[in-house]
Image: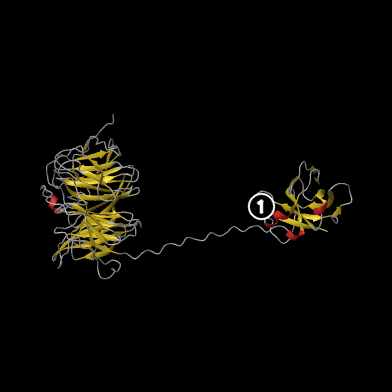
Amino acid sequence: MKKRVSVGSASASGASAPGGRPGHHPSAASGSRLRLLAVLPAVAVPLVVAASASASGTPVLFADTGMSSAPSALTTDAAGDVFVVRSSPSAITKITAGGVITTSWATPPSGNTWNKVLTAPSGAIFASGDTGTNPRIQQLTASGSTAQGYSTNTSGDAPRDTAVDSSGNVFYVVGSGLNRVGRITAGNTAEAPVNLGFQPSSIAVDSAGNVFVAGRNTSGSPAASRLVRFSNDLSTSHDYSVDYGSMNGCLLTARGSYVYCAYNTSGSTARVARIDGLTFDNSWATISAGISSPEPKALQAGSDGFLYVASSVSGMTGQTGIISKIPPSGATTDLATMTWPPAGLAVDPLTNVFVSRTGMGGPSAVNGVYKIAQASPTPTPTPTPTPTPTPAPTAGPATTLATPTVNTSGPGENAVVTVKVQLEKKGKYTFIFERSTSNEMSREQATSNRVSMQKGSKIGKRVLKKRVTAAVITTTEDNAKLVTRALLRKAQAKKLNLRVIYAPTGTAQSESVIKIK
């Protein structure tokens, strides 16, 4: 039996969920239960897009999803399609890369309200609910129906955040006094959850299967932030024992072996910490230095190696927004600014950034999805490999020591062709007789012009035991001298060449062509 552990000693309270967790909708923060009043038909409608393409770093309306309330969580798939959580009624809207909206592509089970949508490492789309009954987590098919429902082994609260590992195991955190982390295996077995001892806000899984949970203590003044790493089966844990100064915990995302934690440090500064193994580097990146009270709302690591963070900013003129782009060095740049605060963020395989708008801020607020089209990076050209030069062949491996002779006066059908040669280097040689018309052909092309050496022919000391078109010998010394007495059919013993090929292992072959009258 696996040993389960409880983490932390702080007492838990029934405090409402902290704002700013991934995919969290403001209406859920009060703890009120939303009921599914109606279901919109899953009908495809034309996509409403901006009249012209956006410049890099400029958000433009990508899709007016017709929502009376703001969309929240976003994700994209490998095809570049966008999936956004909507409410009233609860559903997931799909916006294809080609520009078609399916308003209610997927709907939750009766009594449930979705607040989270994510793309698993397998490419499957998952959704999880904020209120209602089991199953609270669903894996969706390509058409938006439920492929698999996952029931959490908890009661009284639904997942605040959800993550899926590369093996298909599903992880979730619940709060509202329960304050637990749980795992549902790929085989859909809900295992006993682990008590955290603090109120969780976010969860992520790295490429090694380690599970990270962020949150805050619910007692003390001020409440200390928390971050704990678990083994994949949740049986062991490591508490980073760092108070990164956030009253609301942090938002987590993972890419490869790195995990990123975005948080506001008590209202003055927003930071992104990078977790590498057991190292928590809270000085890795600063979001929008000099801007008052940035609050991270969503983040995702893109396929280009950059981290993208959407933050709301409170100021004298109300809430605005900013999208930060952070390279591996941690040197933050502002990709885009908005006159409205963002709610969710997703990055597609082409590094287009999609942001959901809360409907607050600025005139003519539209509850929809906005797109920031980045200039496609210039691909690094694949270097053309420098071919390894082929060593130049020697002038010729065989030199004639006397004029070749052809004797056709003997009895029988065979003529005797005698050639005396000296072989330059020791090694393997191939002797081939062929008609002289093949002299200007490649060896492969001249194959059909070869003349067979009959049984009894001699190449040096080797006596052929059968008829062949190519005879191979090996010499053990340089400048070896030998005599070839080949038995050829008299009808073929005219206008011949003897091709001698030298091809030692690991070097370029060379050859000599000896004319025989």
| Residue 361: image location, x then y, percent | 15, 64
Which of the 4 quarters of the picture holds residue 465? top right
Instruction: Using residue 184 as the reference point, say whether residue 221 is left or right of it.
Output: left
For badge 1, the amino acid type reads Thr
State the residue lying farthest toward the top.
1
Q: Secondary structure at mark 1?
A: loop
Q: Which residue is mark 1?
A: 507
Position of the C terminus, as image quadrant, is bottom right
Position of the N terminus, as image quadrant, is top left
- The vertical placement of 462 against 39, above or below, is above
Which of the 4 quarters of the picture holds residue 513? bottom right
Nearer to me, 206 or 481: 481
Residue 453 in view in this figure? yes
| Residue 117: image location, x then y, percent | 24, 50
Residue 242 in view in this figure? no
How packed mark 1 is, by other alpha carbons closer than 10 Å (few <14, some 14-19, many 20 or more), is: few
- The vertical placement of 188 against 294, above or below, is above
Instruction: Using residue 39 as the reference point, say whether residue 169 is left or right of it.
Output: right
Nearer to me, 411 or 220: 411
- The vertical placement of 256 against 193, above or below, is below
| Residue 119: image location, x then y, percent | 29, 50
- Identify the image's colour scheme: rainbow, by chain, secondary structure or one colour: secondary structure
